[in-house]
């Protein structure tokens, strides 16, 4: 691994650590504000693994991102999305599809 890759890997690990320290930040909030969430990171990880010739399924990738099985994270940390959050999300999705 070259120096740039090491820096990028360390930055990604720090991002995951930061998200882990802020479990109160809901995925719907991340989607509404930044257009990505923890699940997106898992999908990107799966794609990167495939590009490298590695096999990583969605559940495995989410466990790496969430630091635990997704079902456990969801049970302990995920709150139901509010009507307002869903309205914002749906409006953003509709705008993308235009």
Image: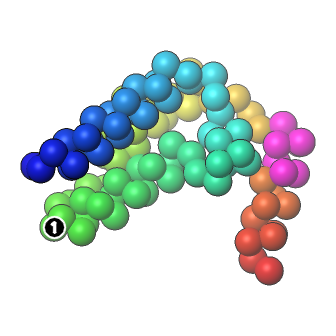
Residue 22 visible, this orientation: yes
Give the x, y percent position of residue 77.
Answer: 59, 24
Display coloring: rainbow
Say which residue appears at 33% left-offset and 58% top-offset. Answer: 46
Residue to which mark 1 is pinned: 53
Give the x, y percent position of residue 60.
Answer: 31, 46
Q: Residue furthest left?
A: 1
Total numbered labels: 1
Is the magenta region chiefly helix, strand or loop? helix
When the figure is inspected, residue 38 is found, relative to residue 96, above or below; the finding is: above
Say which residue appears at 34% left-offset and 37% top-offset. Answer: 11
Nearer to us in this view, 33 or 45:
33
Residue 28 visible, this orientation: no
Tag 1 secondary structure: loop
In the image, is 8 to the left or to the right of 84?
Answer: left
When the figure is inspected, residue 87 is found, relative to residue 21, above or below; the finding is: below
Say which residue appears at 89% left-offset and 42% top-offset. Answer: 84
Q: Around disc 1, counting alpha carbons within 10 Å, would you say few (fewer than 14), some (14 to 19), or many (20 or more)? A: few
Give the x, y percent position of residue 32.
Answer: 73, 48
The C terminus is located in which quarter? Answer: bottom right
Can residue 20 be found in the magenta stretch? no
Q: Residue furthest bottom?
A: 98
When the figure is inspected, residue 26 is found, relative to residue 52, above or below; the finding is: above
When the figure is inspected, residue 54 is found, relative to residue 9, above or below; the finding is: below
Nearer to us in this view, 54 or 35:
35
In the image, is 80 to the left or to the right of 41?
Answer: right
Give the x, y percent position of residue 79.
Answer: 70, 29
Say which residue appears at 79% left-offset and 61% top-offset. Answer: 92
First to last magenta residue range: 82-88
């Amino acid at each position: 691994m070259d120096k740039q890759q090491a820096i990028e890997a360390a930055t990604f690990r720090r991002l995951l650590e930061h998200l882990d320290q802020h479990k109160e930040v809901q995925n719907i909030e991340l989607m509404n504000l930044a257009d990505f969430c923890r699940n997106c990171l898992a999908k990107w990880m799966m794609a990167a693994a495939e590009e490298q010739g590695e096999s990583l399924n969605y559940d495995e990738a989410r466990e790496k991102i969430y630091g635990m099985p997704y079902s456990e994270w969801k049970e302990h940390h995920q709150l139901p999305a509010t009507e307002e959050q869903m309205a914002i999300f749906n409006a953003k999705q509709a705008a993308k599809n235009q």
